[in-house]
């Protein structure tokens, strides 16, 4: 069976924790930052876990990073 190719875009955006969960950074931190509330900006700093709906499809894109 041939090797599977890793989707490099997803591999750069998603990391796998020690327990095997997928972690991503939140969106909304690139531009137009002045209109956003400081409380919201503080919450956007922290990474978050990938939702269960997208978990299986993302794992398929990064087969050797798990």
Image (cartoon, rainbow, N blue to C red):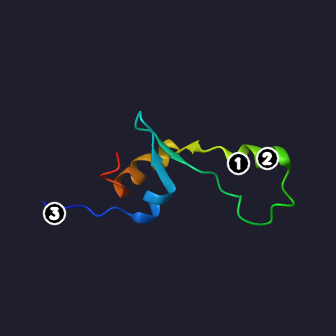
Query: What residue appears at the point 38 percent right and 50 percent down from the top-left corner?
Result: 59
Mark nearer the N terminus (3 vs 1): 3
**Residue 49, picture quadrant:** top right
Residue closest to the eye, 25 or 55: 25
Q: Quadrant of the N terminus?
A: bottom left
Can you identify the residue that label 1 sits on? 44
Q: Check if mark 3's residue and mark 1's residue have beta carbons within 8 Å.
A: no
- Badge 2 element: helix
Nearest the viewer among 47 and 49 is 47
Residue denoted by label 3: 2
For label 2, the residue is 40
In percent of width and height, residue 14 lies at: 48, 52
Q: Residues within 10 Å of mark 3 (few under 14, many from 20)?
A: few
> What residue occupies the far top of the structure in this picture?
19
Question: Whole-Å distance between the Cαs marked 1 and 2?
Answer: 6 Å
Numbered circles on residues, count: 3
Callout 2 touching callout 3 (CB < 8 Å): no
Residue density around tag 2, few if under 14, some if 14–19, many if 20 or more, within 10 Å: few
Depicted 6 relative to depicted 66: above or below: below
Above or below for 32 versus 53: below
Residue 17 falls left or right of residue 61: right
Q: Residue at x 85, y 50 (%)?
A: 37
- Going from N to C along the chain, the mark reached first, 2 or 3, is 3
Q: Position of residue 31 (x, y in %)?
A: 75, 66
Mark 1 is surrounded, within 10 Å at the Cα level, by few (under 14), some (14 to 19) or many (20 or more) other residues, namely some
Cα separation, mark 2 vs mark 3, equals 45 Å
Taking the spot 71% from the left edge, 58% from the top edge, the residue there is 29
Q: Position of residue 12 (x, y in %)?
A: 47, 59
Identify the residue at image location x=87%, y=60%: 35
Task: Measure how far apart labels 3 and 1 are at the Cα level.
Answer: 40 Å
| Disc 1 + disc 2, Cβ < 8 Å | yes
């Amino acid at each position: 069976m041939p090797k599977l190719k890793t989707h490099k875009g997803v591999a750069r955006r998603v990391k796998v924790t020690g327990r095997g969960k997928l972690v991503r950074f939140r969106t909304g931190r690139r531009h137009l930052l002045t209109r956003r509330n400081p409380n919201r900006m503080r919450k956007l700093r922290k990474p978050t876990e990938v939702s269960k709906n997208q978990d299986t499809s993302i794992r398929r894109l990064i087969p050797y990073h798990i």
